[in-house]
């Protein structure tokens, strides 16, 4: 059994300023009315969260932050605490591979961040994914299981129903080389689903939306949407143009209808 929630989230990464972000969000909101059955989310940089939230008021499009700190406050220069995000966004991306690769995030810190976000009513979109070396050496499933176990380790099981997990193989991000639907299904329907079930139970596993990320675009989105274990997409480059992003979202629109 898989989640019936379809989510297509656009991770703008370190792109857009406040003005262009509001313009992009407004265009997404205008088009989202024609894409039923999908929770569309945009994840702008921190500095644009308030303006994007305001631009999206009254629309169905959700807002996500791209990161959060695990502590509520303190001497952590440059960081953003979970309570600061409350009211600005509903979702937060946690453990993106770029955070793991360039900013020293670990399995353990990802788990603490996910738990902290949930404690404040923010819905974590936790990213996991193996590197090319890990895949080619046959360790992909082992790495994904380890990352998922760590991400779930500190979660309040009662709140865990608000979680989503994005499988983003590092070798597919920004490379134009998406995973095949078979590879994504093997990891998402297999390793991720069974690990959530083992840690949090089958009910949570069946309710947790699983998103695929890595070079998703309008040309390949339908192939991923056709896989029952894939409940949506976490889109990078293709989310920076509203029409392109909405085409990806539309591919998931007809599922469960
Ligand atoms: O968060 C999004 C992912 O990193 C995917 O990025 P991409 O669609 O540009 O490959």
Image (cartoon, rainbow, N blue to C red):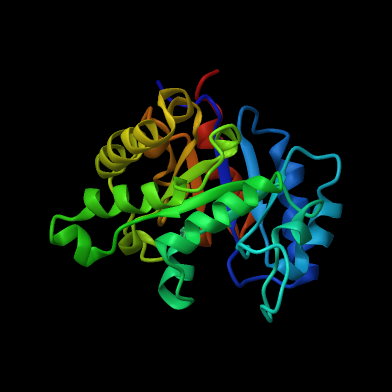
Q: Position of residue 123 (x, y in %)?
A: 63, 44
Residue 34 visible? yes
Depth check: give the residue in front, 189 or 181: 189
In percent of width and height, residue 98 lies at: 46, 69
Q: Quadrant of the C terminus?
A: top right
Residue in the foreground of this view, choosing between 237 and 74: 74
Q: Is residue 96 visible?
A: no
The answer to whether residue 207 is above or below residue 180 is: above
**Residue 188 image point, x, y percent:** 34, 39
Write the residue at 70% across / 44% down: 121
Residue 108 or 250: which is nearer the viewer?
Answer: 108
Q: Indicate left or right for 172 with 256 as reference.
A: left
Question: Quadrant of residue 229 in the image?
Answer: top left
Spot the residue most to the left: 137
Left of 131 or right of it: where is 254?
Answer: right
In front of the other: 84 or 189:
84
**In this rendering, is residue 170 above or below 201?**
below
Q: Residue at x 68, y 81 (%)?
A: 77
């Amino acid at each position: 059994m898989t989640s019936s929630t379809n989510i297509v989230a656009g991770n703008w990464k370190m792109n857009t300023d406040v003005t262009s972000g509001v313009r992009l969000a407004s265009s997404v909101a205008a088009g989202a009315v024609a894409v039923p059955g999908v929770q569309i989310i945009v994840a702008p940089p921190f500095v644009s969260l308030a303006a994007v939230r305001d631009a999206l008021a009254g629309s169905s499009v959700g807002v996500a932050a791209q990161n959060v700190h695990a502590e509520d406050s303190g001497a952590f220069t440059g960081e953003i605490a979970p309570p600061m995000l409350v009211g600005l966004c509903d979702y937060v991306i946690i453990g993106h591979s770029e955070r793991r690769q360039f900013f020293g995030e670990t399995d353990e810190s990802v788990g603490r961040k996910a738990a902290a976000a949930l404690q404040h009513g923010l819905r974590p979109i936790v990213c996991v994914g193996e590197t090319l070396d890990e895949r080619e050496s046959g360790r992909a499933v082992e790495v994904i299981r380890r990352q998922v176990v760590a991400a779930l380790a500190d979660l309040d099981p009662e709140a865990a129903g608000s979680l989503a997990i994005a499988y983003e193989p590092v070798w597919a991000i920004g490379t134009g080389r998406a995973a095949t639907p078979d590879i994504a299904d093997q990891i998402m329907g297999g390793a991720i689903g069974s690990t959530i079930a083992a840690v949090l139970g089958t009910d949570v596993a069946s309710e947790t939306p699983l998103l695929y990320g890595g070079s998703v675009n309008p040309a390949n989105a339908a192939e991923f949407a056709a896989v029952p274990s894939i409940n949506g997409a976490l889109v990078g480059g293709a989310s920076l143009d509203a029409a392109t992003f909405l085409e990806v979202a539309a591919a998931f629109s007809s599922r469960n209808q």
